[in-house]
Amino acid sequence: MSDADALDILSVASGWRAAGEQVAIATVTETWGSSPRPAGSQLAVTVSGKIAGSVSGGCIEGAVAEAAMKTIASGVPQLLDFGITNERAWEVGLACGGKLKVFVEKLA
Amino acid sequence: MTPDLLAALTAARAAKQPVVVATKLPGGEQMLLPAADAAPDLAAAAARALERDESGTVRLGEVDWFLNVYNPPMRLIVVGAVHIAQALVPMAAMMGLNVVVVDPRRSFATPERFPNVTIITEWTDEAIEALAPDVRTGVVTLTHDPKLDDPALDIALKSPAFYIGSLGSRKTHAARLKRLRELGHQEEALARIRGPVGLNIGAVTAPEIALAVLGEFIAARRNSPLGTKSPQSNV
């Protein structure tokens, strides 16, 4: 099923890794309220700026990608919290008022 | 994620095995489940997550584990390599479903008409029997021809398939139920067949009918009220 494969973030990420890119994977581990993507949703990002998949409706991808650069550099995974309050939610971009945790790891 | 874990995960998924990647939070220690050396509570939590088909974080003792579920794709068996199937099959594939087309008429069931999917040209009852629909499989018949649809439905009704649909008007469907009754199927079993098939969205064209069928398939899968089968709910 080639179409399904195209949507498979891990396959995309391991393809990038095999091609010599430095890759991090971000995964939604927990959600509360009206978060747009369920736990298990993934985003892959490379140092060269490639990006695939999503962990939200697009609102926190920038912040996650930034954190991913740190994890790639240090090798240390991170557990990120987004959307603490409704007002704060605007700052990190979670306009929906939802909350979620995102685990960021390097693809070794 | 280590290269070893990624390789094991990729192999398991290629073999269509249901697996879970367990990640200890926040440290990031990982393992692939099921595994012989897994702690019993973690193994049980992973089995439950696979069963529910839902990734999430669980607390075991004092430790948070994120369980990422990798179930094999759900399957849709399409009986009838007809015009509507030509819309339904690519749309279902785009949803990530494992799609199988069954039609003994080789002039219809061609790779030109259905690229990149499994095509089976056996007689429909033999094909469905061999495919052995499970609880993650849907079967939809589209041929309008009792010689092809009925044997497929007969076998599908004896399987645990979670979704069984059959294209045809109310009149066609009533006649179909009568024939299946004569084959010995009870009312409770016959009530599993969604016919006329698909959500009632006023679908007219082939892609619209495909959308109605896939909408109903998802609603049934996710236990949405729309997916609850009742004679009034669809047209």
Image (cartoon, coloured by chain):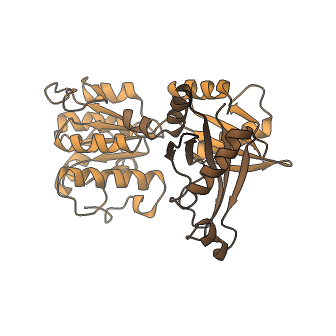
Q: Is residue B75 visible?
A: no
Q: Is residue A91 visible?
A: yes
Q: Is residue B154 left or right of residue A27?
A: left
The vertical placement of B196 against B14, above or below, is: below
Image coords of residue B232 (percent x, y): 31, 66
Q: Nearer the viewer, residue A85 or B195?
A: A85
Q: Which residue is outermost to the left?
A: B107
Q: Which chain is displayed in brown in the rendered image?
A: A
Image coords of residue A11 (percent x, y): 51, 33
**Image quarter (top left, top right, bottom left or bottom right) of the N terminus of chain B:** top right
Q: Nearer the viewer, residue B127 or B49?
A: B49
Q: Nearer the viewer, residue B99 or B95?
A: B95
Q: Is residue A38 left or right of residue B174?
A: right
Residue at the (35%, 40%) spot, across then down:
B93
Q: Which residue is outermost to the front?
A: A48
Residue at the (79%, 35%) spot, across then down:
B40
State which quadrant residue A1 falls in: top left
Q: Which chain is displayed in orange in the rendered image?
A: B
